[in-house]
Image (spheres, rainbow, N blue to C red):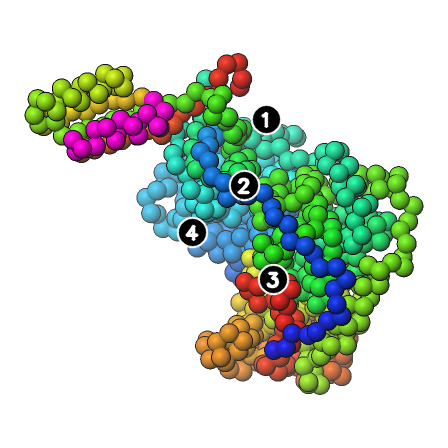
Amino acid sequence: MVTTTLPSTPTAPTPTTTLNEKIGGWHILSALLENKPGVLFRVTNLFRARNFNIESITVGSTEQPDLSRMTITLNSDERTLDQLAKQLRKLIDVVEVKVLDTDKTVYRELALIKMNAGDPTTRMEITNFASIFRANILDIGKETITVELTGTPDKIEAFKNLVDHFGITQLARTGVSALPRGAEL
Amino acid sequence: MVEMIGAKALIHALEKEGVDIVFGLPGGANLPIYDALVDANFRHILVRHEQSASHMADGYARIKRKAGVCFATSGPGATNLITGIATAHADSSPMIAVTGQVPLAMIGKDAFQETDIIGVANPCTKYAFQPRSAHEIPETVKKAFYIAESGRPGPVLIDIPKDVQQSSADMNFPELIKVRGYSPVVDADLSQLGKSVEILLNAERPIIMGGGGVILSGAFSELQAVAEILMAPVVTTFKGKGSFPENHPLAMGPIGMHGHAEANKMILEADCILAVGARFSDRSVGRYDEFGRGMSIIHMDVDPAEIGKNKSVDVAVIGDVKSSLRTLLKMLSKVIVKKDQDNPWLRRRKELIDHYAETLKDYPRDLTARKALKKLREILPANSIATTEVGQCQMWASLHFDVISPGTFFSSTGLGTMGFGFPASIGAKAARPVVPVVDIAGDGSFNMTENSLAVSVLDNLPVIVFLMNNYMLGMVAQWQRTFYNRRYSGVHQRNCPDYVKIAQAYGAQGIKAQSLSELEKAIRSALNMEVATVIDIIIDPEEDVYPFVIPGTGLKDMVTG
């Protein structure tokens, strides 16, 4: 195989630096979906097929019985976020997709955390932490305490780190639900 | 409101959509549909394998620019359709695939011939419906056609359980339909077009890249007018081959892995690309990171999700490209009378074409793929339709067969489906019976759907199979020669079968051509025959396709021989 030599190119294209597309960030998307069978499959299949890495998804009913709201959180650069929103909008069962501005959004997650709490001191300590974090004690047994905590993912993470050394035996998080602040729809 | 069974409602809804032909094969789960079909006012073509039904519907759709329709039964019938559905999806071809399904109560029980075809079809359809009661059928069909044909077209599947086909309901056939989550963009944003005009006027070396979207929206005259007012050379993607007449003084042919050398070279030297209905696929642009550096890119596309998917662009014009080009033309004609024909950029075009005409040598044989295709072009009327199979034959067609009349060349460009060309050519013939239709084929691909000869002969849809035969899976062999040190593995077809006899066995004409003069006679004979002809053209198994942009490299690294 031989590469042919050519008459010289009149002007060589100069490489330009494009915007730094690698800058990551935490994003929340809110989507309204048709509330019917198969829709959740279509959305999650899209994530898989197009290689989108999602942090959390929540789906539930809305004020309109025929629509459900899906809240998606992810860590990504702007370009991936843009593609995700566009690909979601392209799905026929997806009625609306909004990328929420995290500063103008209320968002919460719920976590259930079960910890080892065999001795009374530990139980006291956990109960104290729980009240500082405004968490509820849902269950106390001889060996464990289960706490319900609502807040931003950061708050849940902070509580988790605080109680980690007691030994978390089980943890369940719901993922983030979000709505824009004020009158904005 | 009229009372009828689901199957009848399906047929009636298809009639109302103006369907004139359906390609399919019956089975247990679509018997009610086939019973209703007896009284239909459209034609049914019985295929020999469901894959061919979906390719025929696709070929039909690409010519008519409206949805082609295919039928199959549940389970294996439906899964056999999938290759053709995925092909149509990759090439944005409108299609309605109607499959039978086991009765509602049997769904999920792993019943005989049950497949979760909705699940299977999801990633390769624009949408998939499963009406769960008969009265939903008319509205479902209406929505299916609307979704398949509007915006960026694509295949839609309707999976109908057998009891839904059989049960009776009061049917209401809607004239208009809305789909809440679906609103394709039609008219482009004027401010984006304004920016485009500014960039194009300031460009010294503008180039137009015509993609498949030009063909899908039939924007041929608009593209030509924009090219002529800008005096910009026009390259195409492979899917866009035939979006612009390839004998036009501004034409440069397809770019890409096996694009025209001058086109690959020219686009890298441009300072502005107007990409029309193209998606910057890896096969077209080589490396995403290299392509388009230092150039302004204007991207017109009907699908917003294509903007920025593979390539960041400077201006995005979202909308139907025909309407976008029309508005762009109006804006341009207010500011340009006509650009100078004699400028350094157009001289460069000529220089590159001459350079490569001189340096790119043909394979040293009397009968080569290149000579065969040039001969075919010379004899075929300009308005003939060509489809291709996949592999070397396809890339040779891209390189050596010029499309003169826009919108007359079709190939499986996205999915690269072997076996596409022949049934697609039959579908194209059904759509436009008055012009000659040729499948530019290789032996490996033709093997996959050659039983469609029965359809071609029995249903009077005569096409020409231009079979460049090296008894080899030639493209794979070429890669094994190039990248695997000639260690051939699984590529030899070992002189089997005899294609002349295959043709004759189906009642078609078979002609062997071992020289250019025999080939010329064979083409002329085929054009005069009222039955399908297979021309078995014997070529050398070592003839490679060049130029070649090695995967993972950029267009600048093109190897020419």
Callouts 3 and 1 in the same chain: yes
Disc number at residue B1?
1
Instruction: Tell which tag, 3 or 4, sits nearer the viewer.
Output: 3
Whether label 3 touches label 2, CB < 8 Å = no
Q: Residue at x 51, y 33 (%)?
A: A93
Q: Name which residue type carries label 1.
A: Met
Whichever of labels 3 and 4 marks the residue nearer the N terminus, that label is: 4
In the picture as drawn, the residue positioned furthest to the top comes out as: A183
The chain holding disc 2 is A
Magenta part of the protein: which range?
A151-167
Instruction: Tell which tag, 3 or 1, sits nearer the viewer.
Output: 3
Q: Is residue A124 visible?
A: yes
* Inter-mark Cα distance, 3 to 2: 23 Å
Q: Name which residue type carries label 3.
A: Gly
Q: Name which residue type carries label 4.
A: Gly
Image location of residue B536, percent across then percent down: 64, 78
Front residue of A137 and B239:
A137
* Residue B542 within the segment the image draws in magenta: no
Residue located beneath label 4 in the image: B75
Helix, strand or loop under label 3? loop
Residue located beneath label 2 in the image: A79
Q: How many C-alpha atoms fall within 10 Å of the one at disc 2: few (<14), some, or many (≥20)? A: some
Q: How many C-alpha atoms fall within 10 Å of the one at disc 3: few (<14), some, or many (≥20)? A: many
The chain holding disc 1 is B
* Inter-mark Cα distance, 3 to 4: 43 Å
Q: Residue at x 82, y 66 (%)?
A: B350
Instruction: Tell which tag, 2 or 4, sits nearer the viewer.
Output: 2
Residue located beneath label 3 in the image: B554
A7 left or right, relative to A176: right
Front residue of B183 and B506:
B183
